[in-house]
Image (cartoon, grey):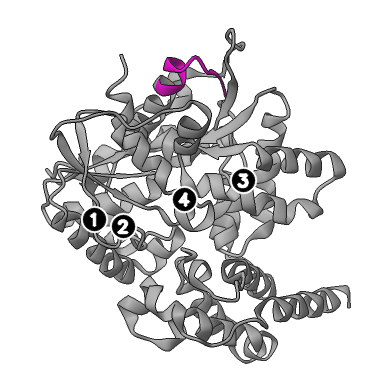
Amino acid sequence: MNTLHNLARRLMQMDDKIIGCMKCGLCQAVCPMFGASGMEADVARGKLALVNNLAHEMIGDAEAVLDKLGRCLLCGSCQASCPPGVKITEVFMEAREVVTAFLGLHPVKKMIFRTLLAKPELFNFAMRVGVPMQGLLFRKTGQPQGTVCAPMLNFMLGDRHMRPLAKKPLHAVHGVIDEPKRAGGMKVAFFPGCLGDKMYTGMGEACLKALQYHNVAVFMSDKFACCGIPALSSGDALGMMKQMKANLAVFAQADFDYLVTPCASCTATIKEFWPRYADRLEARDKNLVSDLAAKTLDINEFLVKKLDVKSAENAAGVAVTYHDSCHLKNSLGVAAEPRAVIAANPNYTLKEMAEADRCCGCGGSFNLFHYDYSRKIGQRKRNNVVASGAQVVAAGCPACMMQLEDVLSHNNDPVKVKHTVELYAESLR
């Protein structure tokens, strides 16, 4: 009875959130999924209509409802352009949670989200085992992005070109870092994220180099768990909560001024999504979430607003274009700062691409379950990158970097993919 009462309450709460939708259709123009499929059901207003009748639809065919809700990258473009300001992304995530709770989480997802990603020691061990296995499964593509492919795994991964796992993860290279504050300096907790720790370690090293250059002390643990966004996007709030609690236990052990991440998805999760679920925590953890959210910053924003990194005078350097990651611009409103970080290296010249803030097509788990659409959306982004004439494309999110490498590698494009801070760190001596 309590379960039914709770379901009814949450459905009514979602009704209250979507009542402002005017069915104006502005979301159609910015929706990357609609641009790829041309189906009205893939537009935000179509999904909101589904959510509006969620109880009836779930009873009819809950699996089909979950599939329709999953055909969304959660990029937030619709929410950013919504005239009445409907919290569309929040509604979709909550709807996925309701339907997933109704159906039950798939056993494989339950194992990944609630055990593997919530237990850093286990996850790190699995990755250590996986690194030597890469040679058996992956082969080099020979493309300048440094990608590999795995034909034997195409049935599961699609014909994907990707960056291999780092031979040694960031946490294994540095161990636990807990530096004392330097005279007149600040101290930050550096949260590299799963991709930053295990795949894009060059990004993590660049961030640590930049922080050291600016006299910033660092706390970094070897026991950070996933931020929780993959679980939350899949409707598994319990899995996300387990991962969040694991991280809270680590953060509670250190004292720092800011929590800094180089991953837009991690930043948005800690800053925006964690507080939405904090009411399910004990009072002590609830206060810690609030405190962390208030001092969490994207690395680009930290460099510009807290360390006063500025654009440098530059000649005609290497042409670089910039992709606005959805979580960075749409969720956090960070757009000028990454461009300033790029321009701080006088050896690069920024050349804006068309539709710089249009989604690249990654969308986390969307990329796994809808790879055909992900590639189609990514191809549009690739075309804009190449049309800019840039030799390098920069982004502020490793998930976007992974998507950009995939589409550029498939097209044999000689364009390298870098994190903005990697470009900045090159200028530091």
Q: Is residue 28 left or right of residue 147?
A: right
Residue type, mark 1 in image: Met
Question: Which is nearer the eye, 203 or 383?
Answer: 383
Q: CA distance from mark 3 to mark 2?
A: 25 Å
The span picked out in magenta is 210-219
User: Is 218 one of the magenta-colored residues?
Assistant: yes
Location of residue 286 in the rendering, given as x and y in whole percent from the top left corner: 79, 44
Judged from the image, the secondary structure of the residue bearing numbered disc 3 is helix
Name the quadrant of the N terminus. Answer: bottom right
Q: CA distance from mark 4 to mark 2?
A: 12 Å
Q: Is residue 275 left or right of residue 421?
A: right
- Residue that badge 1 annotates: 353
Q: From this viewpoint, which residue is outermost toward the right? A: 1
Location of residue 25 in the rendering, given as x and y in whole percent from the top left corner: 46, 85
- Residue that badge 2 annotates: 356
Q: CA distance from mark 2 to mark 1?
A: 6 Å
Residue type, mark 4 in image: Leu
With respect to residue 119, does 404 lie above or below? below
Residue 270's mark? 3
With respect to residue 227, does 168 lie above or below? above
Q: CA distance from mark 1 to mark 4?
A: 17 Å
Location of residue 418 in the rendering, given as x and y in whole percent from the top left corner: 28, 39
With respect to residue 61, does 283 lie above or below? above
Residue type, mark 2 in image: Ala
Disc 3 or 2, which lies upstream in sequence? 3
Residue type, mark 3 in image: Ile
Q: Is residue 279 left or right of residue 150?
A: right
Q: Can you tell which quarter of the image residue 23 is in?
A: bottom right
Location of residue 2 in the rendering, given as x and y in whole percent from the top left corner: 88, 73
Disc 1 or 4, which lies upstream in sequence? 4
Q: How many marks?
A: 4
Q: Is residue 410 left or right of residue 231?
A: left
